Image (cartoon, coloured by chain):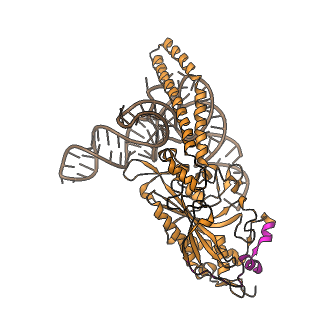
Chain colours: A orange, B brown
Amino acid sequence: MHDIRLIRENPAAFDQGLRNRGLEPLAERLMALDDRRKEAVSALQAALERRNALSKEIGQAKARKDEARAQELMAEVARLKDSMPDLEKAEREANEALEKELAGLPNTPNPDVPVGRDERDNVERSRYGEPRHLPAAKQHFELGEAWGLMDFEAAAKLSGSRFVVLRGELARLERALGQFMLDLHTAEHGYTEVAPPLLVRDEVMFGTAQLPKFAEDQFRAGSEHWLIPTAEVPLTNLVREAILSEDELPLRFTALTPCFRAEAGAAGKDTRGMLRQHQFMKCELVSITTPEQSAEEHERMLACAEAVLRRLDLPYRVVTLCTGDMGFASAKTYDIEVWLPGQGAYREISSCSVCTDFQARRMNARYRLKDGKGLRFVHTLNGSGVAIGRALIAILENYQNEDGSVTVPSALVPYMGGAKRIGGAGR
RNA sequence: GGAGAGGUGGCUGAGUGGUUGAAAGCACCGCACUCGAAAUGCGGCAUACGGGCAACCGUAUCGGGGGUUCGAAUCCCUCCCUCUCCGCCA
């Protein structure tokens, strides 16, 4: 959510941000709405001030038993109050009009974000490892289905399309990946493990900006809850409506949770395999920082996510998303794309974003400055550290052997009960 | 799900219709005293919004929303949350 005062201070910069995201300029319209709002507030407050003064006088008159004067004053207040409902209504409507407009606008991109229209304008930032071009490379679902351990038909019977049933060693591999990542981030990267609710309220979804604009991408659970599309939602909202102290920042949280996405806009996309599912596991990273710390924390978070892929020795590249491809709440995003030999392509496996104070404002999450006075909004960051389902795919495709088995990356062997390969002969 | 008790400032905790943004204590900050510290004394100490160059003025906020009233922390309705007991339950 944007601060109308900052828009007023620099309308041109605000509009440039919108333009970079491919949107029409709006500053003028927003300022007009704000003018109307201010007028309405002032009018209402003037009436309230008058009412309060008269009421006080009534109290004083009654205290000295001057009933005549009290009655006189009460009649005057009664007249004044006739106009109040209209003033209140005008104030409420002016507020809502501005709020509604602001709530639907995406964050302003940082100045250092490449300007572009879509993913084709993203900028590669770094690479790790050599993409393997295996002539007979199989896709992950070919391997998994051949072993009888990845069952889309069974899942369809239970839940429809975009679900999967994993069995045996693949179910264990998913669990192993989750434990491995959680252990890495907690033991070596300083994140605090959190086990959050998976069902959250409207205002929590509003806080991280899934609502109001992206309701159709979410799953509703009952009348008052939503299934989380990512642990970013509960982890970031951990600080909603809080006043933190500067000393305790940055806060770093990690959680391994299922994520639920309606994938409403992805009909017909990535329908084979488990690349794009309605439900998947993800290890999430969230940081809460001061404005001064957030840029550096963003780099740090990216490094933490990269560490996962390095330990697993999976080839990947990092891209900086261009203005047209960034998420709604983000001011700057790095995507990590892992190499999938079966597809012969890099595919997103992590996305690390700094949301500046955009979410903090929606959540009303602030901190008190060290030198005593003053409150400021925190900065929030989130990143996948990393997506478990896609990591599983990447392992199958990158570690496949000619005999149709898959070697277990050494970092995962301890988590696999010592098993060094899966899906081998004799199965 | 049923019955009951509660939700007041950073914390504890007064306050049941009138000038209360809210007593008192603790915590915190400043000053005095002290060689220094403790103790003590004095003072300060919420947030948001509107107006103003500013000093400052105003409005709102005692879990959320709505209502009664000239006036609500105080009365009524409703929702949320916490606690106790009962039921159910992984």
| Residue A178, horizontal then vertical, whole percent | 61, 71
Q: Residue at x 50, y 64 (%)?
A: A298
Magenta residues (range): A128-156
Lateral position of residue B39 relative to residue A284, left or right? left
Q: Position of residue B78 (x, y in %)?
A: 66, 38
Q: Position of residue B17 (x, y in %)?
A: 51, 26
Q: Is residue A339 above or below residue A115?
A: below
User: In front: B31, or A1?
Assistant: A1
Seen at 60% across and 48% down, the residue is A103
Q: Nearer the viewer, residue A392 or A65?
A: A392
Q: Check the image and report above or below for A124 versus A5.
A: below
Q: Residue at x 57, y 56 (%)?
A: A20
Position of A145 relative to A236 (above/below): below
Height in image: A249 above or below B30?
Answer: below
Question: Within the image, what quadrant is residue A326 found in?
Answer: bottom right
Look at the image and say whether residue A326 sits in the magenta stretch: no
Specify whether A354 is left or right of A215. Answer: left
Q: Quadrant of the C terminus of chain A?
A: bottom right
- Toward the viewer: A351 or A132? A132
Whether residue A392 sits left or right of residue A146 in the image: it is: left
Residue A39 seen in the current view: yes
Q: Is residue A130 magenta?
A: yes
Residue A218 seen from this side = no
Q: Residue at 58% across / 43% down in the picture? A: A99
Q: Position of residue A9 (x, y in %)?
A: 47, 45
